[in-house]
Amino acid sequence: MSEKSLLDTTKPNPGRIYDYLLGGHHNFEVDRRAGDFIKSLAPFVPKMVRLTRWCLQDIARTLTYERGYRCIIDFASGLPTMGHLHTAVAPGTVVIYSDRDPICVEYSREILGDTPNVYYFQADCRRPEELLNRPEVEAILGGNRRVAFVYWAITGFMTDEEIANVARVLYDWSDEGSCWAVFLMEGNPEHPTAKRILDFYRQIGEPVYYRPLAVFRELVQPWQPDELGFRTLEEWHGLQDTMTEDDKQFIAAGGGGYGVYLVK
């Protein structure tokens, strides 16, 4: 991800575009124009963005209420608006957000204010050790390394080498029983709609990568999927019946993906 685009608020930023597509208000005119352009290419995108956010709320509830994790560490968090993780976790859960964009970090801290047990730090998701080795984070965790990591809707902006490095760092750092919730972007890069969207993100300096599920399985080794396995967005949230045929074609050919709980 380009440092220049992150710091220049006159250029569209993926996190702020995402907020706009969710219906949020923490974005600029340049982001709204970019979001409208994406919607003109693929009208289903706002629905898909909402699906990914609803999945995050499912993840927050599952990890904390059902699986008992007392700490969630989220990478490339973007703005903590519109029903982000901390709004759906069990009481007392520690949520550690992070993003590499210093503007996003400061803005997010203002949004969160004094929300208890929620923290936001600057760190690059491609180098998770930047966050995990911070003295402030170590103090918050108090030696607890049985945690849940979240990389949701961000691996599409990462190269194969970056994903493989993250997998190894998280695995080596965490204790047995830790979990890594990940969303994999998958699609046909030759599909006309997908090509236009991929070209747009390249133009703003934020290239997006589609990769087959088989490749992703290898990249995240030695993490293993839990008994639920890899599930598509519509399978994850049970919304198959709400989609039009055009929606389903877009997801299948140019913008779908899989969610998974990987366990150590």
Image (cartoon, rainbow, N blue to C red):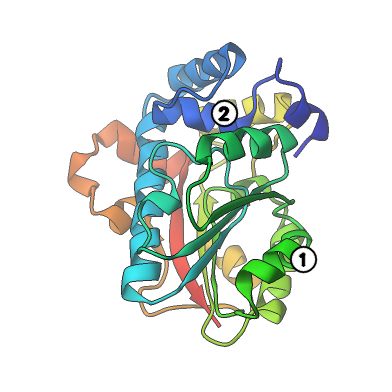
On the image, the x and y values in percent for residue 135 come to 77, 66
Q: Quadrant of residue 15?
A: top right
Q: Point out the image quarter for the C terminus.
A: bottom right
Residue type (three-letter) at the residue carrying disc 2: Arg
C-alpha distance separating marks 1 and 2? 29 Å
On the image, the x and y values in percent for residue 146 come to 56, 80
Q: Identify the residue shown where x is 65% and y is 30%.
A: 201
Specify the label residue 18 is tagged with. Answer: none
Is any part of residue 192 visible from this angle?
no
Most extreme residue toward the right is: 4
Q: Identify the residue shown where x is 43% and y is 46%.
A: 84
Q: Quadrant of residue 108?
A: top right
Residue 60 horizontal side relative to residue 180, left or right? left
Q: Is the residue marked by circle 1 packed among few (<14), some (14-19), or many (20+) residues within 10 Å? A: few
Identify the residue position indicated by label 2 in the image. 16
On the image, the x and y values in percent for residue 12 come to 65, 22
Look at the picture and state if 192 lies above or below 102: above
Most extreme residue toward the left is: 241
**Disc 2 element:** helix
Is any part of residue 248 visible from this angle?
yes
Identify the residue position indicated by label 1 in the image. 135
On the image, the x and y values in percent for residue 77 come to 57, 47
Look at the picture and state if 121 lies above or below 206: below
Residue type (three-letter) at the residue carrying disc 1: Pro
Q: Identify the residue shown where x is 31% and y is 32%.
A: 246
Q: Identify the residue shown where x is 51% and y is 58%.
A: 117
> Is 62 in front, or is 194?
62
Residue 139 horizontal side relative to residue 65, left or right? right
Of badges 1 and 2, nearer the viewer stands 1
Look at the picture and state if 199 lies above or below 155: above
**Disc 1 element:** helix
Q: Point out the image quarter for the N terminus.
A: top right
